[in-house]
Amino acid sequence: MTDPKRPSDDAENPAQTGEPVVSKPYIMPDDPEEGSNEALTKELAEARDKVLRTLAEMENLRQRTRREVADSKMYGITGFARDILEIADNLQRALDAIPAEARETADPGIKAFIEGVELTERSLLNTLEKNGVRKFDPSGEKFDPNFQQAMYEVPDPSVPSGTVVQVVQAGFMIGERVLRPALVGVSKGGAKAAPANNEPNSAA
């Protein structure tokens, strides 16, 4: 006879009741249990790494933006500066067209006119230099194709071969870039020239 107080076999064996058996998932040794100190430490390290990466990206963006703003300020006038150089060239040509003897014998009115042209040229060059555009004259330097354009060769054994002996047109720099290379005549026939400087000398 069955004891009514005795639990049935079905209650003791869940598999026979048809109910699924849920077991605790296995946790890998390297995967800390959720909520443990080790898991919290790992999450904190990951969050710190993300913050540091974000800060580094923001700093790079800030520096890049600052460089772009500086370049825009410095080189944004490149086209305008090239146009202004034509005015400077015309003033220089006007002064070069007056022989030295004519200057000495010119009447006071002509001398005042010449001085006015010279003053205008100096003022224009000073204004360009205030805006980062400077004139350079490579006379006597080793020819450097990065800053000069050779127009012709001049036989001159008294100076090293490859030396700039004549400047047809002065060059101009804007910041660290060449705005216009100098047009020059280069010597040939002399000894080998010394290495060129990387930076052109400013005109006096």
Image (spheres, rainbow, N blue to C red):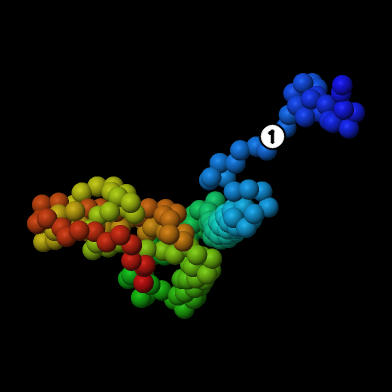
SS for callout 1 = loop
Measuring from the top left, give residue 138's x and y in whole percent. 30, 61
Relative side of 84 to 138, left or right: right
Residue lying at 32% horizontally and 71% vertically, measured from the top left: 101
Residue lying at 90% horizontally and 28% vertically, measured from the top left: 4
Measuring from the top left, give residue 68's x and y in whole percent. 56, 55
Q: Is residue 37 visible?
A: yes
Q: Quadrant of the N terminus?
A: top right
Residue located beneath label 1 in the image? 23
Q: Residue at the bottom extreme?
A: 108
Q: Residue at the right extreme?
A: 4
Measuring from the top left, give residue 160's x and y in whole percent. 13, 58
Residue lying at 25% horizontally and 55% vertically, measured from the top left: 143
Which amino acid type is shown beneath numbered disc 1? Ser
Q: Is residue 110 visible?
A: no
Residue 158 image-quadrant placement: bottom left
Q: Quadrant of the C terminus?
A: bottom left
Q: Nearer the viewer, residue 144 or 126?
A: 144
Q: Is residue 189 above or below residue 16?
A: below
Residue lying at 73% horizontally and 29% vertically, measured from the top left: 21
Q: Residue at the front extreme?
A: 1
Q: Nearer the viewer, residue 64 or 156?
A: 64
Circle 1 packing at 10 Å, graded few (<14), some (14-19), many (20+), is few
Relative side of 195 to 147, left or right: left
Measuring from the top left, give residue 162's x and y in whole percent. 19, 53
